[in-house]
Image: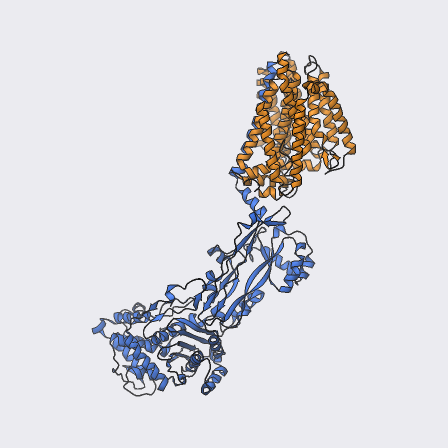
Amino acid sequence: MRKDYNLEKRKFIIGGFIIVICFIYFIKLFELQICETKYKDNADSNAFFRKTIYPSRGLMYDRNGELIVYNQPAYDVIMIPREVTDFDTLDFCHTIQITKEQFDKRLTDLKNKKINPSYSSYTPQTFISHLSAQDYGRIQEKLYRFPGFFIQKRVIRQYNHITGANLLGNIREVNAKDIEKDDYYRPGDYTGDLGIEKSYEQILRGSKGEEILIRDAHGRIKGKYDNGKLDVAPVSGKDLTLSIDVELQKYGELLMQNKIGAIVAIEPATGEILAMVSSPTYDPTQLIGRVRGKNYKELVNNKYKPLFDRSLMGAYPPGSTFKPSQGLIFLEEGIVNLSTAFPCYHGYVSGRLKVGCHSHGSPINLKPALQTSCNAYFCWGLKNMIDSRSRYGSPDKAFEIWKNHLVSMGYGYKLGVDLPSESRGFIPNSAFYNKIYGKGHWSANTIISIAIGQGEILATPLQIANLAATIANRGYFITPHIVKKISNDTLPRKFSEKRIPTIKRQHYVDVVEGMRMAVIGGTCRFAAIPNIEVCGKTGTAQNPHGRDHSAFIGFAPMNNPKIAICVYVENAGFGATFGVPIGSLMMEKYLTREISPGRKYIEDRMLNSNTIIYSGVKKH
Amino acid sequence: MILVVAGAISIYAASYDYDQANIFDFSEFSGKQFMWIGISLVVGFSMLLLDKRVYETYAYLIYAIVILILILTIFIAPDIKGSRSWIVLGPISIQPAEFAKSATALALAKVFSGYNFTLNKNYTNYLKVSLVILLPIILILMQKETGSALVYFSLVLVLYREGMSGLILFASICAIIYFIVAIKFTEDIILGIAAGEFWVYIMVITVLIGMLFIYCRAIILGRNVTFGFIGAGLIAIILNLFGLEIPGRIFFFSIIGLSIIYILIFMFRENIKKIIISLTFAVASIMFLFSVNYVFGNILENHQQIRIKVALGIEQDLRGAGYNVNQSKIAIGSGGFLGKGFLNGTQTKLKYVPEQHTDFIFCTIGEEEGFIGSTIVLALFLFLIIRLINIAERQHTAYGRVYAYCVVSYLIFHISINIGMVIGLCPVIGIPLPFFSYGGSALLGFTILLFILLRIDASRRERGNY
């Protein structure tokens, strides 16, 4: 047959045609598979449903193994807006017992970017949190009728002992800031708020697990991806053993009822905090679950500020509880020795300046001065130190040395307790006074009130208690801490290292004797506990705004001390009237587990007294 | 020859694998497909055993039988997803349209192999050929299997090879482009008419000028007409700048009309026939333009309109008509360079892509074997087609050549449309990917198609030895 070569050429056109098509497809495949990355994410979000499994949060026990904080399951109704299709709204509302209006409101709130900035129709949104077990049971059965809704099991807190609300803290939903700071968090997660829950968040929270489930085109779960090989099991948070003695803590809160103030009790040898009371306090269960928001707001607006942890956030003038530290400095600096005596004629008189004092023998040396809480003695001591140009050259330099001693005792800076929001108190330095009075224009008399813990000096009850612990230890302290043990983990080293102030041990021994004398025959006679050698020092902090604050520091037994304490009661008057009895009751309770019959009347008086009424009352 | 078999077998192997991959939890599907592969191989080899002359001699008979079956199908087939194309025989169902392809190819080849038959000799030859092709198209359309019916239009390629004027091919390509442009750009308005219409006018003018120059070689005429158009265009632009807007349709009608009159007056110096064709082309183009909207809006069914719109990117409709294509793009796109690995495709395994074991099977390859895999498959098909073209050209008889080109045309159409729709370049037309898609009839149909070709090719030597 004749071949038409002209026509045969057309095979190239046909061949070329298909080559061009294949080439175009090749380019398109290249674009789809190599250049574009969004398809990969699309496919993953299509197919994988990542279900978060929340770990159980670490429990908290007291120092005797008594369970304080534990977990309870809670059930949140979660929705993925994109996947919600038409459903019987009324049935839904009825099942979880809300009204149609609440339902609509919740839905609009969810979608409101102002209220809920992390809203996305693709991500799970918490529709209702903390369902009751009954509601959970009901909705679980019907869940298949509400596409796009599912139940997320959560862990919330429950309290075995209603105590230590500020100390323990609580948990709340993370906010935008938390998420920004720590990418562990996703919207809807919980985080610790206040107290131990906050400072030990990383240890308590454990780590979230994730189950990767495969979901088909109809949204049905087809099982685990790759047999669960890529699933991450949740890791439970670590349990904490607190150094708190829950009985003592509760007893302290009881004694402080109707009073404003704080108690801090420390085991001197270890720095472990035995009790840390801030009053007024509140019931930590108020901040669990759905009622949290409302109650929290009320607590914030409460005029007595129960959320303010006075034991470590409150900075108070330490008053006479400051005097032992002064004695220690004067002895260390050689300003005084045990027999150095200063005159006191109802006070310190220097030129036109007079600091009042009460009746006692004169002249007086250190131990009796501590015993009687003589203001004049410590003023003279400070004057001899600051104004001693022969020794220090200038008041500036003398003052710096004075300040450094105090800083070494834990004043003026945060002690480093394992709780959030610790205040650093305030110890001025010479630059501070130079600024106020001008360099060279101030001397001891200008600032004399700091000798008796007044004036610019501010300290937290924790710092004051730490002084008591240091004296009890005769010259060292361990950074106070609230957590005694972390399960399967170790405490930071700083909670077992001794911190030694710049004062020799011998001087502490002398101060201890003075404080013992105060209990035997001085200002702290109410502190005496039968068969236990108690040491103490009262404090009556003058308060320019109202009634004086009543303070006490002490420790017991004198030899081998088990407990050191600071009590600070706002507007309660003399240290001896409230500080001393409360402090001694606390020590007795801790050491003997009961109050001796002869002292029951003190306990009754404390329980029944009310000093909160003096709060905000102008000085009379 | 061996290469073709090897290619075919490798694709068979691949097809077996992918079907497994797709329907891993539907042992039923892969089992059935296995059975079909077996049947196909047996039938295929028995085809090879038959004498070549059987196909040649009984071509019309086979064609007639298949046509009869097609007619029968319209009446006895149950309604499956709106189409009546399946004959159910107990547990298996057969789609006769798939076998009609081979039969039509045989019949077409037979027509061409008639003594001294050439396409261009007279119009009855065209009529005969068209009849052979159009008969199954009409019957399959009556079964509401538009996709399968469209496949037969690919036989235009065969006619082209056998001498049909290239103008018709050119015209079809122009028609497709005009269609797309006219449909796609309906939003913007230029000179008071839709942008699509505007650009079609411009293209018609360009094509007319091009034809005058290249096809008619009427240089002077072409030059004058070009100047005329450019002048008219400049005037229009200037008027427009002065805020005087000429209605676009009247403008184009008048300038094209004037140019046609001008050409008609001066055409006697040139090749009259070619100029007439060129002018007819231009006029037909304009008429086509006006029919486009009517056809699109009134003749095409709603779902077809939407599919075209989706392919042209006019509509997105990710939940409805665009869902398939979007999910299939996601599947392919998520495969990346190396793919997710055999059986690891999430998109396809979890049935996000509907019809993924039949028409959308290319997704599975794209997702699980990645860019490498899909390119290899594409290359294999290309290789197969080029190989088939070579085989076609080495046939000594018109019969063999025409048959081979039929096979080539079918394959080109199937592959380009199928892969094109999966990657979102063509509208969704329900036709399978040869050798890959699940479905016994299609597989058997293609096997028969290919093995008859092999048989014909094998006997090429015998003939040569005489």
- Tell me if A336 is positioned left or right of B102 in this view: left
Could you say which is closer to the camera, residue A615 or residue A527?
A: A527
- The image quadrant that residue B423 belongs to is top right
Residue furthest out toward the left: A390
Could you say which is closer to the camera, residue B109 or residue A29?
A: B109
- The image quadrant that residue B406 belongs to is top right
- Tell me if A106 is positioned left or right of A170 in this view: right
Letter of the chain shown orange in the rendering? B
- Relative to B4, does residue A89 appear above or below in the rendering? below
Q: How is the image coloured?
A: by chain
Horizontal and vertical percent position of residue A439: 27, 69
Horizontal and vertical percent position of residue B410: 65, 26
- Tell me if A518 is positioned left or right of B441 in this view: left
Horizontal and vertical percent position of residue B415: 61, 30
Residue B446 visible = no
For the C terminus of chain B, which image quadrant? top right
- Relative to B58, does residue A499 appear above or below in the rendering? below
Count of numbered circles in the view: 0
Residue furthest out toward the right: B75
- Relative to B355, does residue B408 appear above or below in the rendering? above
Horizontal and vertical percent position of residue A536: 37, 80
For the N terminus of chain B, which image quadrant? top right
Residue A473 visible = yes
Check the rendered structure and report the hue given to chain A.
blue
Could you say which is closer to the camera, residue B4 or residue B292?
A: B4
Could you say which is closer to the camera, residue A445 or residue A536?
A: A536
- The image quadrant that residue A547 belongs to is bottom left
